[in-house]
């Protein structure tokens, strides 16, 4: 009996471990492999992030299209899945607080005022503003997954790739009237919207000057500020960041490995290319394209209705010019 129990223990331990595992939020897509160059043509994006292609030693590396004698394919993002960020857990110390005797106030949860995240000059211009701080406060200390709105993937027969993903995040900031007054500002909410946009534009320019993010572009738009219930200003705006890795890739069957020019860890994936569609899934729920929360992506061949500027179609704007209808 003792021997039997000792043999059974590892099995029970395994069953308990499996029972406690959480199912992946993102379901892996197909793993059929296939032809990544289907419907391709000879174009290449000449980027300053890597060396000129063979035979193009004198090319100007300024993100313009050219020809290098190798077939290239361009894909537009049609869908994807990012890991879901759960709500912050409530600390046990806040749930099971003992009753307080009469006359004693219970422990109150404190939150810093919005004013601690922004500094205004006397003319109302923004001197400092921590948007990440306000995001953390709004999400109780958690960073939410920033959704990806659009993207392009360029693959070349010579083994190079380039990914550009656009993440779009809507943000809000609340400023009370007392906050504005305390900092010596006197202005309308519409005036403040202009000054807030000016400051964020400057911050984004500094971000894209960082050598680690030289392939990125960023913009702020739709900045609208209105009077709130506290006679202060509530401002909404959209923040978009576009960029991603480039480097070399290799395929073995249905496995597709992306190597980053910036020497970040390789991205291990499985893919399925069929009928003008391409599915890419990270292996074992790891990072896809070195994005911490991105797990799967779906792509379609570039078109005049995909919402991005396609190099393979010679577009001079988004979905216009080149092989597409003229730009207005």
Image (cartoon, rainbow, N blue to C red):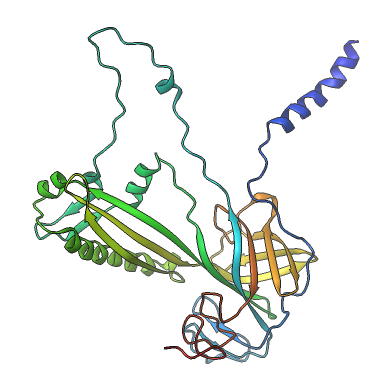
For image coordinates 65% across by 65% down, the residue present is 298
Q: Look at the image and tell me whether residue 52 can be seen.
A: no
What is the tally of numbered marks visible in this picture?
0
For image coordinates 35% across by 11% down, the residue present is 99
The quarter of the picture where the N terminus appears is top right
* For residue 207, above or below residue 95: below
Please identify the quarter of the rendering in which residue 114 is found: top left
Residue sitting at the far top: 101
Q: Nearer the viewer, residue 314 or 46?
A: 314
Residue 292 appears left or right of 216: right
* For residue 64, above or below residue 204: below
The quarter of the picture where the C terminus appears is bottom left
Please identify the quarter of the rendering in which residue 92 is found: top left
Residue 255 location (% of width, % of height) = 75, 62
Residue 67 location (% of width, % of height) = 61, 91
Residue 212 location (% of width, % of height) = 44, 65
Q: Nearer the viewer, residue 121 or 139?
A: 139
Residue sitting at the far front: 229
Residue 315 location (% of width, % of height) = 52, 86
Residue 11 appears left or right of 213: right
Residue 55 appears left or right of 181: right
């Amino acid at each position: 009996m003792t021997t039997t129990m000792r043999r059974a223990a590892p099995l029970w331990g395994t069953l308990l471990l499996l029972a406690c595992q959480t199912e992946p939020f993102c379901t892996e897509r197909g793993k059929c492999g296939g032809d990544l160059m289907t419907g391709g043509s000879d174009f290449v994006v000449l980027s300053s992030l890597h060396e000129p292609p063979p035979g193009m030693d004198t090319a100007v590396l300024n993100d313009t299209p050219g020809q290098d004698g190798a077939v290239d394919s361009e894909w537009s993002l049609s869908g994807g899945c990012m890991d879901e960020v759960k709500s912050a857990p409530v600390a046990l110390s806040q749930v099971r607080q003992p009753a307080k005797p009469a006359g004693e106030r219970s422990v109150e949860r404190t939150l810093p005022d919005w004013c601690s995240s922004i500094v205004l000059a006397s003319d109302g211009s923004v001197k400092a503003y921590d948007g990440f701080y306000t995001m953390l406060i709004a999400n109780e200390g958690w960073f939410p997954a920033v959704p990806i709105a659009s993207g392009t993937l360029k693959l070349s027969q010579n083994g190079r790739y380039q990914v550009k993903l656009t993440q779009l995040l809507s943000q809000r900031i609340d400023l009370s009237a007392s906050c504005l007054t305390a900092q010596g500002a006197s202005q309308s909410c519409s005036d403040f919207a202009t000054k807030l946009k000016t400051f964020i534009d400057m911050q984004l320019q500094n971000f894209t000057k960082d050598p680690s993010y030289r392939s990125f572009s960023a913009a702020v738009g739709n900045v609208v500020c209105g009077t709130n219930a506290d006679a202060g200003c509530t401002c909404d705006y959209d923040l978009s960041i576009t960029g991603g890795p480039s480097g070399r890739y290799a395929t073995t069957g249905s496995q597709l490995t992306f190597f980053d020019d910036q020497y970040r860890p390789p991205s291990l994936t499985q893919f399925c290319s069929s009928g003008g569609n391409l599915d890419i899934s990270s292996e074992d729920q790891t990072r896809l394209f070195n994005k911490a929360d991105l797990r799967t992506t779906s792509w379609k061949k570039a078109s005049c209705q995909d919402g991005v500027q396609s190099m393979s179609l010679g577009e001079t704007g988004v979905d216009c010019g080149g092989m597409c209808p003229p730009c207005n």
